Image (cartoon, grey):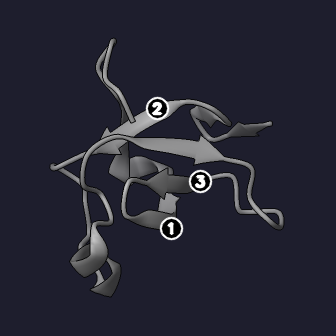
Amino acid sequence: MTVAAFRVGDRVVKNPATWVPNEFDTWGRGVGVGVVVEPPFPLDPDEADVRWPGGRCFEFACELLPAPPGSIP
């Protein structure tokens, strides 16, 4: 499955230039390296379901960047 520029299993980090904070940031949204996972229902092409170390959240692909090589989720 492809989600915008990301596929299930891709490791991602937040893009500080485009990140839009919300209430989920308080539990760790966007902290560390996330993994794109299979969403429970279809998402818009510009969205991704990301499992961050602190929990899962739907993200806009424009707010994400590929994680650096060798980074560990």
How packed mark 1 is, by other alpha carbons closer than 10 Å (few <14, some 14-19, many 20 or more), is: some
Q: Which residue is mark 2?
A: 11
Q: Which residue is mark 1?
A: 57
What distance separates the C-alpha of mark 1 from that of mark 2? Answer: 14 Å
How packed mark 2 is, by other alpha carbons closer than 10 Å (few <14, some 14-19, many 20 or more), is: many
- Residue at the bottom extreme, as displayed: 23
Above or below, 3 against 56 in this view is above
Whichever of labels 1 and 3 marks the residue nearer the N terminus, that label is: 3
Above or below, 32 against 52 in this view is above
SS of the residue under disc 3: strand
What distance separates the C-alpha of mark 1 from that of mark 3? Answer: 8 Å
- The residue lying at 46 percent from left, 66 percent from top is 55
Q: Label for residue 48?
A: 3
- The three-letter amino acid code for the residue at tag 1 is Cys
Whichever of labels 1 and 2 marks the residue nearer the N terminus, that label is: 2
Residue 36 is left or right of residue 65, and the answer is: right
- The three-letter amino acid code for the residue at tag 2 is Arg
Image position, residue 26 (x, y; %): 23, 80
Identify the image quadrant of the C terminus: top left
How packed mark 3 is, by other alpha carbons closer than 10 Å (few <14, some 14-19, many 20 or more), is: many
- The residue lying at 29 percent from left, 81 percent from top is 22
